[in-house]
Image: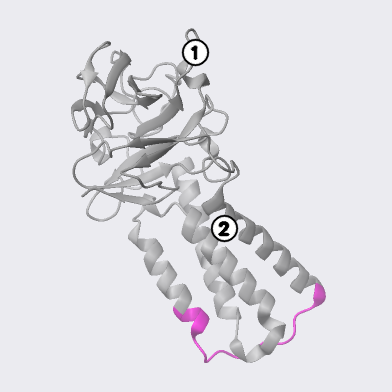
């Protein structure tokens, strides 16, 4: 099961970072700088990319505090000088982690074509960017998916910082976002909707991406697509005019979805006869803020 695999990888990387921090000593002079570089870069990598949400987003803060304390702890034995091969390998791995750390903030898309200024489509609670970012490497699951390089998958957090009652559950009701009300993120016109597809029972995704319930809105110069909605819980119809903050649907688990979440993406308008997803992908701003992979979104 991919959920458990990702969680195990996260915990293993965290333990390795802790180990590197324990190995580093300030008493070793410059001969230990390779250990410092590896410990810092690997810790930052797993802090940013780790799937902490499978247990609690607060665990990564605990990890960060423990790492800093151990790294700065002065009473560690002086290490012997490492061999050149070990130093070279450590620096090589540190460089890889460092590049990934930088790409977390910059992505690989360069300057975006444009932005879609939206309101947050939820009213209360804390939410979490399950997938998102600026193309590779932070948005790998949306890469080449209908040009969705800025698409976002959003889940909701409970009071413990989890997105569900368990690490993984086959019960849809265990997921905090399931049946959560979705509000229109903009003023616009409903272009198309679908509401007849059944929810998947995790971890099944056999229905595929073409069998999702969704709403497609046209808002001025761009389209907004929201998917994986609950069957029978889309409140608007094709041709309707909607306003920001208006209830339009409930979140579900239809289509190509491992677990309940909201998928949202925005594209510039296309010429007549050209599919909406062929338009230039737009960076989504919620209340003028761009959210990256594994960031918490707090409603006001």
Image-quadrant location for residue 122: top left
Task: State whether residue 78 appears in this view.
Answer: no
Relative to 230, residue 49 above or below: below
Position in image of residue 237 (x %, y %): 24, 13
Q: Which residue is mark 1?
A: 271
Q: Residues within 10 Å of mark 2 (few under 14, many from 20)?
A: many
Q: Nearer the viewer, residue 89 or 243?
A: 243
Image-quadrant location for residue 92: bottom right
Q: Nearer the viewer, mark 2 or mark 1?
A: 1
Position in image of residue 270 (x %, y %): 48, 17
Image-quadrant location for residue 117: top left
Residue occupying the point 44% across, 16% down: 210
Q: Which residues are magenta?
A: 69-84
Q: Nearer the viewer, residue 74 or 8?
A: 74
- Specify whether residue 72 is painted magenta: yes
Q: Residue furthest right?
A: 84
Relative to 135, residue 46 above or below: below
Q: Residues within 10 Å of mark 1 (few under 14, many from 20)?
A: few
Position in image of residue 198 (x %, y %): 31, 18
Residue occupying the point 57% across, 29% down: 144
């Amino acid at each position: 099961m991919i959920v458990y695999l990702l969680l195990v990888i996260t915990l293993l990387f965290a333990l390795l970072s802790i180990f590197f921090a324990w190995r580093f000593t300030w008493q070793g002079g410059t001969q230990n700088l390779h250990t410092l570089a590896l410990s810092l870069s690997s810790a930052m990598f797993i802090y940013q990319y780790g799937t902490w949400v499978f247990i609690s987003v607060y665990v990564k803060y605990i990890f960060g505090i423990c790492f800093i304390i151990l790294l700065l702890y002065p009473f560690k034995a002086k290490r012997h000088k490492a061999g050149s091969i070990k130093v070279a390998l450590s620096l090589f791995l540190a460089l890889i982690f460092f590049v990934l750390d930088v790409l977390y903030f910059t992505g690989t898309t360069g300057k975006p074509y444009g932005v879609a200024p939206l309101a947050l489509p939820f009213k209360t609670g804390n939410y979490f960017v399950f997938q998102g970012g600026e193309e590779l490497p932070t948005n790998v699951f949306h890469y080449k998916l209908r040009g969705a390089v800025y698409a976002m998958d959003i889940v909701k957090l409970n009071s413990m910082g989890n997105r569900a009652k368990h690490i993984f559950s086959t019960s849809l009701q265990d997921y905090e976002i399931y049946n959560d009300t979705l509000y229109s993120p903009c003023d616009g016109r409903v272009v198309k909707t679908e509401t007849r597809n059944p929810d998947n029972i995790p971890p099944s995704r056999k229905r595929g991406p073409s069998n999702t319930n969704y709403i497609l809105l046209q808002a001025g110069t761009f389209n907004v697509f929201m998917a994986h909605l609950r069957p029978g819980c889309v409140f608007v119809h094709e041709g309707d005019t909607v306003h920001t903050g208006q209830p339009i649907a409930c979140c579900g688990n239809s289509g190509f979805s491992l677990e309940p979440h909201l998928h949202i993406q925005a594209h510039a308008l296309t010429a007549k006869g050209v599919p909406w997803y062929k338009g230039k992908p737009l960076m989504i701003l919620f209340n003028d803020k761009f959210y990256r992979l594994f960031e918490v979104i707090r409603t006001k």
